[in-house]
Image (cartoon, grey):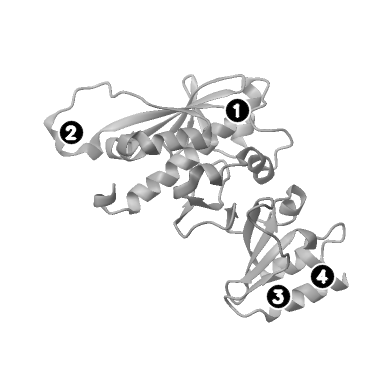
Amino acid sequence: MKEEIILFNKIEKLMVGENWVLKKVDIDISCPLIQIKVNKWDLKKIIIGNKESSPLEKIYCISKEGFSTILVTIFFDKDVLKMFHIKKFSRFKLQIPCTKKLLTLKSKYSLLGNYELYVDQEDCIELYKDISHNAEVLLFYDNPLGEFSNKSILHSTLNNVLSYHEEGTGFVREDYRISIINSKSDILEMNILLTKPEVGFLIGEQGHRIEKLRESSNATIQILPIAKRFRLMDILCPDSINQQISIVGDVYSVALGIASVESLLILHKWLPRKHL
């Protein structure tokens, strides 16, 4: 307990913007890291108030972001992450260090709920290198995602993290543009309704973006054809044309594919037209 008190006293003395590295390791060859933003008083409860176990051995670095805001970088550990799992935390950051080309994503489609993820658009495959393990840790599933024995278990599990209502033979995400079209055993198909310019951006020049999405998510992603003829008004206003993309795979592959699609859509919204 004495070591924990000394640690917290050092944290209180940190200046805003100052970093304190507790572990000297080569990050490139070590296990993945997660960065969590936390109020210093909550951090004190976690470090000092936890009688059963201490997270000290798993803390890599501590940074002071504001007067009472601390960024804690921890080694990827399921039990330690559960200690930090408080709703007040505003973000997780995966696989650091990352490049400066970061995109902040608070995904309305993601199975990760209300957390903001930092997604490196330049190296999506590297970011998700250990994504199956990330899924188990971040979502706190006892069994790997995708191992569902039947349709009812699949839907009840999804309902824990997504708000659905039943519509016909499928399930539709309320307020959003996602629908579960089909689910058999551990395979899930979801369709997302987009505008034609959004679909064009997802495809990218010579299809490089959509190929990267397929590789990083390990899901089958297809662009569904538009079943109507274009009018002059449609040609002049392509934003009025809707088109669907289909994402098929196990539960986690689909969830990752959807979150990755939305991160690109946010990028599409932010970028000047000349970069699209």
| Distance CA(mark 3)–CA(mark 4) | 11 Å
Label 2 element class: helix
First reached walking from the N terminus: tag 2 or tag 4: 4
Where's residue 225, x and y in %? 31, 23
Question: Label 3's element?
Answer: helix
Tell me which label, 4 or 1, sits earlier in the chain. Answer: 4
In-image side of 201 versus 112 (left or right): left
- For residue 98, the mark is none
Q: In this view, does 260 lie above or below 40?
A: above
Q: Distance between the residues labelled 4 and 1?
A: 43 Å
Most extreme residue toward the left, as rendered? Answer: 232
Q: Mark 3 points at which residue?
A: 11
The mark lying in front, picked from 3 and 1, is: 3
Q: Measuring 65% from the left and 57% from the top, which residue is drawn there?
A: 27
Q: Residues within 10 Å of mark 4 (few under 14, many from 20)?
A: some
Q: Earlier in the sequence, mark 3 or mark 4?
A: 4
Q: Residue 234 carries which label?
A: 2
The picture places residue 103, in percent across and down from the top left corner, at 45, 54
Q: Which of marks 1 and 2 is in front?
A: 2
In this view of the protein, which residue sits in the foreground, 152 or 16?
16
Q: Residues within 10 Å of mark 2 (few under 14, many from 20)?
A: few
Element at label 1: helix
CA distance separating discs 1 and 2: 37 Å
Whole-percent x and y of residue 72? 66, 64
Residue ID for mark 4: 4
Q: Which amino acid does label 1 sit on?
A: His
Q: Which mark is residue 155?
A: 1
Mark 1 neighbour density, 10 Å: few (under 14) some (14–19) many (20 or more): some
